[in-house]
Image: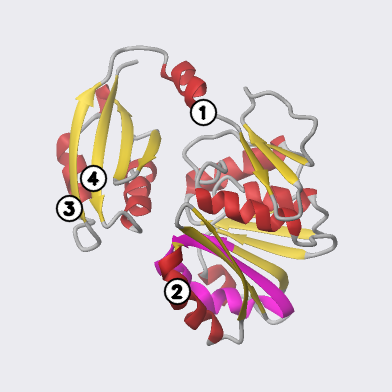
Amino acid sequence: MKYTEVSFTINPVEPCRDLLVDALGNEGPYDSFVETSDGLKAYVPTSQFDIVWLQQQVDGLHDFATIEYSHTEMPDKNWNEEWEKQHKPVLVTAGDGKRVWVRAPFHEHRPDADYEIEIEPKMSFGTAHHPTTYLMLSYVAEIPMQGKRVLDMGCGTAVLAILAKMRGAAYVEAIDIDEWAYNNALENAQRNHADLTIRIGDADLLRHRTKDETRFDIVIANINRNILLHDMDAYASVLAQGGMMLLSGFYECDTPALQQEAEKYGLQMMEQKVREGWCALRFGA
């Protein structure tokens, strides 16, 4: 099958890149994406490439960023095979030395890892290659999970939720607004024999809960700065007394804004991790 590659330059990159991926993949025919330092490469079957529709998606995001793009038709080849050659497994080493091996079904088993997670890496975010996923996996690997109730907001592939369940969490709920991510999370949970409650929706699912519904010992949200700031009230509303909140999806320079917003809800920052300029924060209630 012939594919067309569309290269985007986005300024500023976040959060527009995530919005563009959602528009192209969830609403359109684009089926694979590669993040670049200044934007994104997106791939679509050439037979489904529509320059007019593409421009409409770009125009719809002009309030968020300046987006420039170019496109080229790729040589005809087995792109699944080529992509598998490029996709590498990831070894995450937590602060306490625990090792988490995140691999695709076509990668080798690693017996020396403490935890091994098999992820079918489709369009959903969360294969441990991105620094924020790496940071959050390290948190989930080292924080006690035994018997805990855990919520994973914006779960993507559900890799964080799966690891929490592997580490003994009593109940894990994973939520994502994207239908593609929801279906991929279901598939990955089954693949890893993880008993998860997976739901499709956004933070309103939390705001509409009654007082008798589950409160969580640990709330995880690896999304982006603007959504985290907007939905902090919802995350805090379902956090049990003495609970913990893990946040990522933003740059280190965004930490003060996240900290200030969290403090409105009685959350105190306990720790910060940084990787390649990206940041993860641990808060206590």
- Between residues 153 and 251, which one lies in front from this camera angle? 251
Among the two numbered marks 3 and 2 on one chain, the one whose residue lies closer to the N terminus: 3
> Are the residues flagged by discs 1 and 3 in contact, CB closer than 8 Å?
no
Q: Is residue 132 left or right of residue 190?
A: left
176 relative position to 68: left or right: right
The Cα atoms of the two marked residues, 3 and 4, are separated by 14 Å
- Disc 3 designates what residue? 59
What's under tag 3, amino acid-wise?
Answer: Asp
**What's the magenta region?**
221-250
Label 2 neighbourhood size at 10 Å, few (<14), some (14-19), many (20+)? some
Mark 4 secondary-structure assignment: strand
Residue that label 4 marks: 9
Q: Quadrant of the N terminus?
A: top left
Give the class, few, some or many, for how many residues have Cα within 10 Å of label 4's Cα (few <14, many ≥20).
Answer: some
Q: Indicate which label's residue lies in the foreground, 3 or 2.
A: 2
In the picture, the quarter occupied by the C terminus is bottom right
Q: Which residue is mark 2?
A: 229
Image location of residue 198, percent across then percent down? 64, 53
Q: From where the camera sits, is residue 208 visible?
A: no
Q: Are marks 4 and 1 in contact (CB under 8 Å)?
A: no
Rounded to the nearest angstrom, the CA distance separating label 2 from label 4 is 26 Å
**Mark 1 residue type:** His
* Residue identifier under label 1: 87
Q: Amino acid at mark 4?
A: Thr
Q: Residue at x 23, y 45 (%)?
A: 9
Q: Quadrant of residue 100?
A: top right
Residue 54 visible in the shown view: yes
Q: Nearer the viewer, residue 25 or 110?
A: 110
Give the numbered dot on residue 119. none
